[in-house]
Image (cartoon, rainbow, N blue to C red):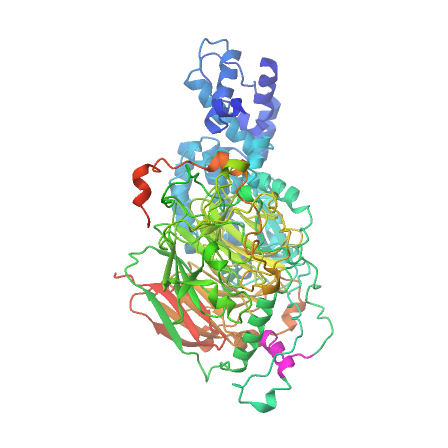
Amino acid sequence: LNERLCFPEGYVTTILEDAKIYSSHAKKSSVDADDVRLAIQCRTDQSFTSPPPRDVRKTVLGIREPGSREGWEVTVSLQFLLDIARQKNQTPLPLIKPYSGPRLPPDRYCLTAPNYRLKSLQKKVSSSAGRITVPRLSVGAVSSRPSTPTLGTPSAQAVSVSAKVGTPVSLTGQRFTVQIPSSQATVKAATPTTPTVQNVLINPSLIGPKNILITTNMVSSQNTSGESNPLKRKHEDDDDYDNL
Amino acid sequence: QSVRHCVFASSFCPAHKLLFGNTIAVGGGVVVEDQPDVSAVLSAYNQQGDPTLYEEYYSGLKHFIECSLDCHRAELSQLFYPLFVHMYLELVYNQHESEAKSFFERFHGDQECYYQDDLRVLSSLTKKEHMKGNETMLDFRTSKFVLRISRDSYQLLKRHLQEKQNNQIWNIVQEHLYIDIFDGMPRSKQQIDAMVGSLAGEAKREANKAKVFFGLLKEPEFDVPLDDEDEEGENEEGKPKKKKPKKDSAGSKSKKQDPNAPPQNRIPLPELKDSDKLDKIMNVKEAARRVRLGPDCLPSICFYTFLNAYQGLTAVDITDDSSMIVGGFADSTVRVWSVTPKKLRSVKTAADLSLIDKESDDVLERIMDEKTASELKILYGHSGPVYGTSFSPDRNYLLSCSEDGTVRLWSLQTFTCLVGYKGHNYPVWDTQFSPYGYYFVSGGHDRVARLWATDHYQPLRIFAGHLADVTCTRFHPNSNYIATGSADRTVRLWDVLNGNCVRIFTGHKGPIHSLAFSPNGRFLATGATDGRVLLWDIGHGLMVGELKGHTDTIYALRFSRDGEILASGSMDNTVRLWDAVKAFEDLETDDFTTATGHINLPENSQDLLLGTYMTKSTPVVHLHFTRRNLLLAAGAYSSQ
């Protein structure tokens, strides 16, 4: 993991690595412009005339680890696209599970997690200046937009679970998501434990007081470590910053 | 390791590239280039001809064609453009710059007017380096341009070219062209002009032979509850049958499987939820009040003008029930408006939701937060102009695609972004939800269209085949097929099940910007920058109509709810209405039994045009028929 951080993958790195190889082949002491030119040319032609390297295939397919660098541009031939398409189109279309709630990818591929971490329970809870997040919806559970006025003081329901599970917590008295106590929460970002009815319709009989809306515990540690930026603006003097 | 790289470098370079002096440019003593084999040099020269003689070859062929019989001349003239481009590109790619320049100057004026845009691009492509980044040109060079010629004309050509002195040009023809021969009368220039124009040439007859299930899926039967509002008492018991005419213009009450319709489970589709059923019931009720349109009963048109958009309006969509309108803008925002007096509301916060009475009848109202009510919601997230927007059929989600290479899924209950789908690494020009939800399609600069499902972060299908950007993507009403329009001037139909391209339609002379399927699923209408609307019979794979009238790019096409009228909206600030019933019924079915791949198109644009409606300098970007057949149009006022 450390290496990935030190040597980011990317177009420039690949070209420079190739150039280094050519340079050493020519027994030169250092890489010069000609080596780089050769490296670029080889890469371009290669993408066009023969099957490109695996990372190019992955880029075109859109396979990317969450948190990884954005794809870089490559010249690809129609033949290459046809190959990739043939490979991709062989898989049968997946069956659709009925009544599985809002059909979204696993949480780490969604933008529904909080991208903030609250420092601690303050006397007055400051709002997130960042993007308001939304948990996996079963029945429209949610956090509202920034312009919604807050309810004021945090309610007594404020759950400070941070001590227990070590994940960022949202205060229920606010506009944020409810953190279900971990015993009830499903950790996997998959189907909810209780069957839910789609989106707008709430089936009242299925909703109990505790699990009214949140289907999953989307605030999982794997999410937030990469994405949450403890907002630098969360200083004491931000406590008065109620509304956005 | 060094040996491996030596082999690598020389083996991937195809022989003919080496012989035209295209060795790997290196400096400083890196020995990577291969010594070209002399015999290899000669054989390649024979295959491609001597580049210095290209002008002679071309003018020789030109002379032959111009002297040929009238009936063959039009067909043989089709060779000019592809040969000109291919020979020019060969000269440029092999670095014969001066020969290329001279060749271009001598012959570019002979080409048909509809190729002018291509020629302009070519004229600036004078060095090999210019070609390197242009995938379209590179692929054009390595693929074969398809020409359709009658057998008689072909025999004439072949006989002439196989004479000894013409062998070189014959080799070039064989190298770069694919001649699809048909048995029948040679085509007239007019017929040819209607169907040529794409970068790939025309479509081979066999490319349009696959069976396509163009029929509609059966709608589920359910009881439509009687309503106090309904005045037509005698229609009440007929209600369950009434919903069929909504989809099938013939009003068929048959329960037998339509042989042209796909099996219900050919592709997995999401189950019908309660809210969907309610919506369908609503649809049926509205359909009962729908205006039957026709030449004597034209729709009223209600135009939604976006003011102060300063040419920043790049995409529009309207929900099926016409309750919301969305605009995608060049400033990367997505703005949703409510069309009805009912305002847009967000769902309440979690704490508030826990306080409401879940048993109450109006719980759906109670979950909405009144404090958030507004007519407009702005969605931020994209980092580039938004080129496509699409509401989900159940109105819970909104899709938007952008120049930033992503497609975003937004919730219309919280008005926040849920997912960003990455895959196209280039601008995405269009996106659309499937008519049944769950699936969506996107197309972009990377020349492919992708099929996605909302719960998969990777595409399920990749539709590759276009030579240039995919500019427009639409689902067929039965969700089993996807139509794509491209900057390579072709329209392709793809099978969602296996990703195969089942139809290729050529005829447009510019990038395609609008596509519309007829409600019965049998026909496709396409509009492009050439100002023509072309009509296609999907089952037979043929062009069946050409609607001339617009003078600028057609950005919007929509059939009325029962398919009687086709509305087109254009950059020329007009909306035109065409008689779709007449356009399709005038076809002579005899023509379809021929294998030629074309029918005689009648010159009936004037007869089919029912009306032209001008706006005050507002290009029309979107068209939508409400459930009662009122036509809504949208565009941004442009003060030029």
- Verify whether residue A159 appears in magenta: no
Give B104 or B399, whichever is nearer the viewer.
B399
* Image side of residue B80 versus residue B570, left or right: right
Q: Which residues are magenta?
A: B239-253
Above or below: residue A89 compared with residue B327? above
- Verify whether residue B251 appears in magenta: yes
What x and y, as percent, mark residue B53? 48, 35
At horizontal 51% and vertical 85% (from top left) the residue drawn is B229
At horizontal 58% and vertical 36% (from top left) the residue drawn is A57
Give B65 or A217, whichever is nearer the viewer.
A217
Picture mark count = 0
Q: Quadrant of residue A34?
A: top left
Give B253 or B198, whichever is nearer the viewer.
B253
Q: Quadrant of residue B511?
A: bottom left
Give A7 or A159, whichever is nearer the viewer.
A159
Q: Residue furthest right?
A: B256
Q: Residue furthest left?
A: B639
At horizontal 49% and vertical 29% (from top left) the residue drawn is A10
What x and y, as percent, mark residue A37? 45, 23
What x and y, as percent, mark residue A194? 64, 55
- The quadrant of the rendering that contains the N terminus of chain A is top right
- Is residue A75 at least partly visible in the picture? no
At horizontal 45% and vertical 12% (from top left) the residue drawn is B28
- Is residue B295 at least partly visible in the picture? yes
Q: Residue furthest bottom?
A: B234
What x and y, as percent, mark residue A59? 54, 37
- Label the magenta part by its dominant secondary structure: helix
